Image (tube, rainbow, N blue to C red):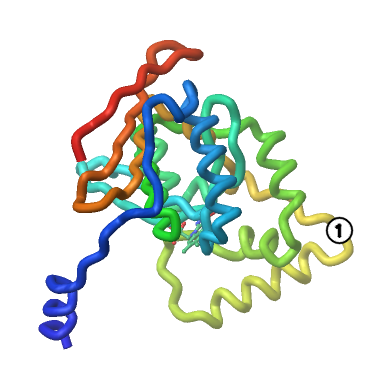
Amino acid sequence: MIEEVSNYLNQVRHDFSKAKLDEENVDENPIEQYAKWFEEAVGAQVLDPKAIVISTVSADGQPHSRVVYNRGLKPTGMVFYTNYHSNKGRELEGNQHISILSYWPELERQIRMEGKVEQLPAEESDAYFASRPRESQIGAWASNQSEELTNREVLEEKVKSFTAKFEGQDVPRPLHWGGYLFVPHRVEFWQGRPSRLHDRIVYEKQTDETWTKKRLSP
Ligand SMILES: Cc1cc2nc3c(=O)[nH]c(=O)nc-3n(C[C@H](O)[C@H](O)[C@H](O)COP(=O)(O)O)c2cc1C
């Protein structure tokens, strides 16, 4: 099986031809540009454009990547929510530098971002938590994210127990669950082009308000 898949992998080819990217047609601000591409991704029915890969680095220098959901844009960056005690939460305590990746194959587009995270103010996490479905709220209490579970029943029992505990009342936000604001200082937009001659435009932050942009070789 491995050999067949490997044969397939080194033979299959895909040429990119859907669009192009010009320095003149991109926004001066990469968050605005991201918002523009995001709208186009929704319009093109990209399966799950809010899914982003975030990569954190642990104290031993090992990078760790996983998907989370982009839950908001601000003029300075992007918001996601998680368990502050999870592996990623602990890694972010020690090292706030992360990278974020989006790949939207339906549009032949990749977006790479590098920057730093800060925890959102508690009131913002409270407001978002309160908007989540009750089952997800209970789940945030029941799951010690990233910790070993003896079996699934243990998790399901915890869900039952927190469901009973909070019956008849609003589920409060666990203090170990909340948001991060990711503030990028470098953002690259990649548009696939024929013959691997792709367009790459990278933004670098100069001040809080200003960015420079340049084209990179594919
Ligand atoms: C489509 C998708 C969306 C996800 N969204 C989130 C999310 O918003 N927050 C989160 O903590 N984990 C999310 N996860 C789960 C993470 O990928 C990961 O399994 C979890 O956060 C534990 O990661 P860690 O052990 O490195 O901390 C999502 C996974 C997928 C596949």
Name which residue lies at 44% across and 45% down.
Answer: 89
Element at label 1: loop
Q: Which one is in front, 68 or 203?
A: 203
Q: Which residue is mark 1?
A: 169
**Which amino acid, mark 1?**
Gln
Name which residue lies at 35% across and 35% down.
Answer: 188
Quarter that holds the N terminus: bottom left
Q: Is residue 170 above or below residue 34?
A: below
- The quarter of the picture where residue 107 lies is bottom left
In this view, the residue farthest toward the right is: 168
Residue 150 location, x and y as percent?
A: 44, 77
Would you say 215 lies left or right of 77 here?
left
Residue 144 in sight: no
Q: Which one is in front, 9 or 205?
A: 9
Quarter that holds the C terminus: top left
Q: Is residue 161 above or below residue 211?
A: below
Name which residue lies at 30% across and 37% down.
Answer: 200
Name which residue lies at 45% across and 29% down.
Answer: 25
Would you say 85 lies left or right of 194 here?
right
- The quarter of the picture where residue 138 lies is bottom right
Residue 189 location, x and y as percent?
A: 37, 38
Q: Is residue 128 above or below residue 17?
A: above
Residue 109 location, x and y as percent?
A: 39, 49
Q: Is residue 197 above or below residue 149?
A: above
Q: Which one is in front, 127 or 202?
A: 202
Q: Which one is in front, 31 or 56?
A: 31
Give the crowd class for mark 1: few <14, some 14-19, many >=20 residues within 10 Å.
Answer: few
Would you say 81 lies left or right of 169 here?
left
